[in-house]
Image (cartoon, rainbow, N blue to C red):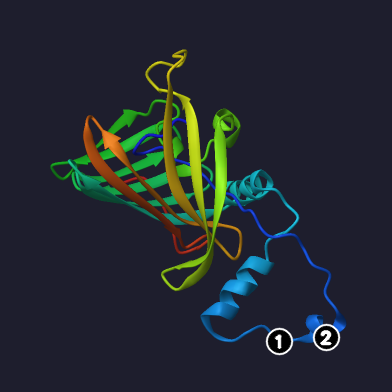
Amino acid sequence: MSIRPLALACLVIALAACKPSTPAETDAPAPAGPAGMLEQAASALDPLSSPEDEMKASMDKFLKAKSFHAVMDMQGARSMVIEMDFVAPDRYRMKMPTGTQVVIGDTMYMQVDGRSMKAPLPPGTLTQWRDPLRIEEHKAGMSVESLGNDSVDGQPAKKYLVRHTGPGPSRPQSSQPQSSEFTFWIGGDGLPLQLVSQGESQGKPYSMTLRYSRYDDPGIVVDAPQ
């Protein structure tokens, strides 16, 4: 998986082997409080699945989402915050420091000096938002490590460390591999909550946090500017 500041990836789960439960264990109530919430979130995931299976299942669910909200916070030489709303199958609204951009299909509507301009959009431009993992394309050279239970904004989650070794993006045939890693959080419903990556871009360090929320929220509407 080629790792770039705006196109990062990963989701995976490595759970302990499943233990048969006794009737007493089945009827026992879940622990109260944050620990109980995390346990319930973990139990919603199949403990017999491999990390790769869990990753694919989560991404399949993510790709079926009818809508969601995402916030990308970039810190480094070029710090910025971008908010994005998505409505299936192909509507995006991105609030950027330079203005708001709306994408519908292969057309981008840009706001410049209070005016709206239309421009064609090259295919794949928004892949990092809709399909951040690109599993099939980058599955070779990827390893995943479970980091246990965690939470994101109070929501119980599972945390993972994903490492990838592969050719550099500018030299696909290069024999010199490039390594990268990032962390990813999956909520108890199997949907991604957060991705964090750190690295270098143009010789300078950066950190990126990408958070997802408001899945299948009918209140998210994306229309072309008038």
Give the residue drawn at x 45%, y 64%.
219
The image shows residue 86 at horizontal and vertical percentages of 45, 50
**Labelled disc at residue 75:** none
Specify the farthest residue to the left: 113
Question: On the rendered structure, is 111 left or right of 191?
Answer: left
Question: On the rendered structure, is 51 left or right of 223?
Answer: right
Q: Is residue 127 above or below residue 40?
A: above
Q: Nearer the viewer, residue 225 or 66?
A: 66
The image shows residue 163 at horizontal and vertical percentages of 49, 40
User: In the figure, residue 113 lies in which quadrant?
Assistant: top left
Give the residue drawn at x 63%, y 46%.
60
Label 2, label 1: how far apart the Cα atoms are: 10 Å
Task: Give amino acid for label 2.
Answer: Ala
The image shows residue 216 at horizontal and vertical percentages of 54, 60
Give the residue drawn at x 61%, y 59%.
190
Q: Is residue 185 above or below residue 94?
A: below
Q: Which of marks 1 and 2 precedes in the sequence?
A: 2
Q: Nearer the viewer, residue 41 or 132?
A: 41
Which numbered disc, 2 or 1, marks the residue closer to the eye? 2
Task: Give amino acid for label 1.
Answer: Pro
Q: Is residue 73 visible?
A: yes
Element class at badge 1: loop
Q: Is residue 96 visible?
A: no
Element class at badge 2: helix
**Labelled disc at residue 24:** 2
Judging by the rendered image, the residue that carries numbered circle 1 is: 29
* Label 2 neighbour load within 10 Å: few <14, some 14-19, many 20+: few
Question: On the rendered structure, is 208 left or right of 180?
Answer: left
Disc 2 vs disc 1: Cβ atoms closer than 8 Å?
A: no
